[in-house]
Structures are given as C-alpha cells and as structure tokens.
Amino acid sequence: MSEKIWLSSPTMHGDELIFVQEAFDTNWVAPLGPNVNSFEEEIASYIGGGYAAALASGTSAIHLAVKLAGVKSSDIVFCSDLTFSATVNPVSYEKAVQVFIDSEYDTWNVDPKALEKAFEKYPNCKCVIIANLYGVPAKLDEISDICKKHNAVLIEDAAESLSATYKGKQTGTFGKYGILSFNGNKIITTSGGGMLLSDDKEAIEKSRFWATQSRDRAPWYQHSELGYNYRMSNVVAGIGRGQLLHIEKHRELKKSIYMNYKEAFEDLPITMNPYLPYSEPNFWLSCALLDKGYNIHPMDIIDELASHNIEARPIWKPMHMQPFFESNDFISANGNVSSDIFNRGLCLPSDIKMTKKAQDKVINIIKSMF
Ligand SMILES: *Cc1c(COP(=O)(O)O)cnc(C)c1O
C-alpha cells in the first residue's frame, strides 16, 4: 500500500523542540510558565493587538467566552449551524439554548439575512457565536453590524481560520471575544490547546482566574466562584511558539493546494469552497462542492479515495441535523443551505506535506470518476 495521504496532519519544524527543551531545562513542566506568557503575547501581536489567554483547548476558550458574555441558564444563543459541534456545545454547558442559523453560499458561514430573521423571532437574544468554516472568513461586517444593532455579544470562533484576514484584518478580532484552537489538525498545532482573545484586558484576566480554579487572593485555597482546570501547559505552549514561526509558510502551502484543485476541477461539475474577494482565507481545508443534480455522491468520492489510502471527509454535519439538538430551533432565510452543502460537499486532502505528485494522484482519482 502506498503511503497514506492525510486530510491535515501536524507539520513540525524542529523549532518547537527548542522551546520545549527550554521548558525542561528550567523545569517549567507545569501549567503556566514563561512559554505560556510568551505564546500569549506572540499570538496577540500576530493578530494585531488585544489580549490572549492560553487554554487547554478551543472548546474551553468558547466556554469561557460564553461565560464572559453573561449567558445564563435558558438564555437563547444564536450559533452557526454548519460547524463542528465544539462551536456550540459550551452553550449547553451553561444550560442555555442554541438556535441554529443557516449558512449562505458565498462563504458557507452564517447568513446575515437568517441572523436578522432570528432576531425578529427572538429579540432578547444577547449572544451570537459564529465560525469561519474551513478557514474562510464569514460576512463579518454584516454580522458585526447586526449584533451591534441588537446589543448582542459576538463570539468569533476562529479555530479553523487563524491567519485568515477580512479586509486586511485578522480573524478572531471581529467579536468581543475570539477563540483559536491548536488541535492536531489545525493550521498550527500544539497537539492540543486553545486561546481566548479580546481587547478587554479585565475579561482576559477573569478568564485566567476561572481557568485556574477561581482561586481567591487568600493564603489558603478559597473559592468564591466556580473554577475550571483550563490552562495550557508550559510544555505545550513551547510547541505553539515554534509553530507560530512557520504559520505564513503553512498558509502559502495550503493556498497552493487549494489553487491546484481549483484549476484541475475547472472542467468538472465541481466548485471549490468559495470566499469573498476582500477576504483572504487560510485555506485550512480545501473543500469541493458537486454541482446540483449530479449523480455522484460525496461519499462515493470519499470511499474511492479511502481505497487508495487517501483521507477525505464529509462536510461537518449541520447542527440542526444532529440527534442531540433535534429539539433546537433552526432559522433559515433561503431554503436549507447548510444541508445542501453537507449533501453535495466534501473535504479534500489538504495536508501541507503532500507532494505535487501526491496531489495529482488525488486529482486523477477524482477525475476518473466523472
Ligand atoms: C477544532 C474546532 C474547535 C475546537 O477546538 P478544540 O481545540 O479541539 O477544542 C472549535 N470550533 C471549530 C470550528 C473547530 O474546528
């Protein structure tokens, strides 16, 4: 069997080990430590300012953002429908209720028209969580304006979009809170980890307090608030510091993979996941959408690639189609776009260690099916 072609696997450079070695040499093998502080500063500076709290995962970052937004039991929170469940699960941790917002076809992200419609139905909603799917920035101006108009806190889930920009500005910076993930398959990884972003220094300090078990300033272990063990470890932060040095290269390679697919599929009934002309995705995953009415199902392509030891994946199954969320409301302005994308789309191998030859192999297998 030929060597496996991955969807998106970690790419290490060696610099990571320098920072990890430093952690070992100084015995900072603990949550917190100099790598954590530096990684927070380096990320904040990379995205263009504000403050950052390094956490155990992107999911824990969303959880703390939801708490900071003041979401309480039985509150309504508007969420991206087409996304990974981690975007929306923390709403349930706080016993609040997700209302899922349909996608649009220009970016596959939250449709501003559906969001506006949701505010007509639930005018008291005070928090909105949107994701930039597969590294493609959403219609962030329109979404921000709607949230402002209705006095709702916007949480931008930039777990998949670190290094993508919208009108020249980094994603993760458009909401009151932004979150990043450094899980194993993301554009840069720490094996596992996340970051909470905000311009609000006090909010970030509060998140660090919650993330370290909410210890009061007292000589003994005293707690006036519920705490969490959500901090990033100093060893893991070292991996992140080394990875961040290579993020531009990662994005360039991801982009060249996307462009290769786009060119190769020009004569096929396939389009690539689209983006706005004034946004620059990070091209984290290259996704294909089969033309309407075509008789090949995405699973046929995924299975065919798998038989050649090549990993491809379905599009995230929309949240309103998940058994766990079957009683939650779903708001759409224009049919059911997220289900349509799920039914016609797939994620193609987007691993930056893929050679040109390996990518041509993927392309030729797909071409041979049409
Ligand atoms: C990966 C991901 C997360 C969660 O990040 P973890 O670090 O795995 O907890 C959240 N939202 C989206 C859209 C993701 O892809």
Image (cartoon, helix red, strand yellow):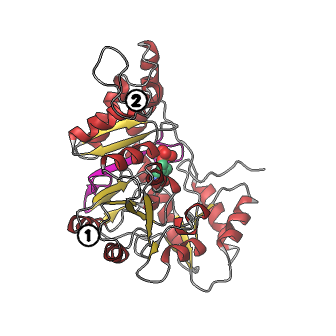
Residue at the (61%, 86%) spot, across then down: 293
- Relative to residue 358, is residue 115 depicted above or below? below
Seen as rendered, the residue at the extreme bottom is: 293
Badge 2 density bin: few <14, some 14–19, many ≥20, Cα 10 Å:
some
Residue 350 drawn at (x, y percent):
54, 56
Residue at the (46%, 25%) spot, across then down: 235
Q: Is the magenta stretch mostly helix, strand or loop?
A: loop
Q: In terms of image quadrants, where is residue 43? A: top left
Q: Label 2 amino acid?
A: Gln
Residue 116 drawn at (x, y percent):
31, 75
Q: In terms of image quadrants, where is residue 154? A: bottom left
Label 2 vs label 1, nearer the camera: 2
- Judge by depth and name the residue closer to the eye, 121 or 135: 121
Badge 1 density bin: few <14, some 14–19, many ≥20, Cα 10 Å:
some
- Compare marks 2 and 1 and give the one earlier in the sequence: 1
Q: Is residue 138 left or right of residue 286?
A: left
Residue 213 is marked as: 2
- Judge by depth and name the residue closer to the eye, 242 or 138: 138
Residue 219 drawn at (x, y percent):
31, 14
How many numbered marks does the figure carry? 2
Quadrant of the snapshot with the C terminus = bottom right
- Judge by depth and name the residue closer to the eye, 368 or 106: 106
Regarding mark 1 in the picture, which secondary structure is present there? Answer: helix
Residue 53 drawn at (x, y percent):
33, 37
Residue holding disc 1: 146
Regarding mark 2 in the picture, which secondary structure is present there? Answer: loop
Magenta-colored span:
167-189
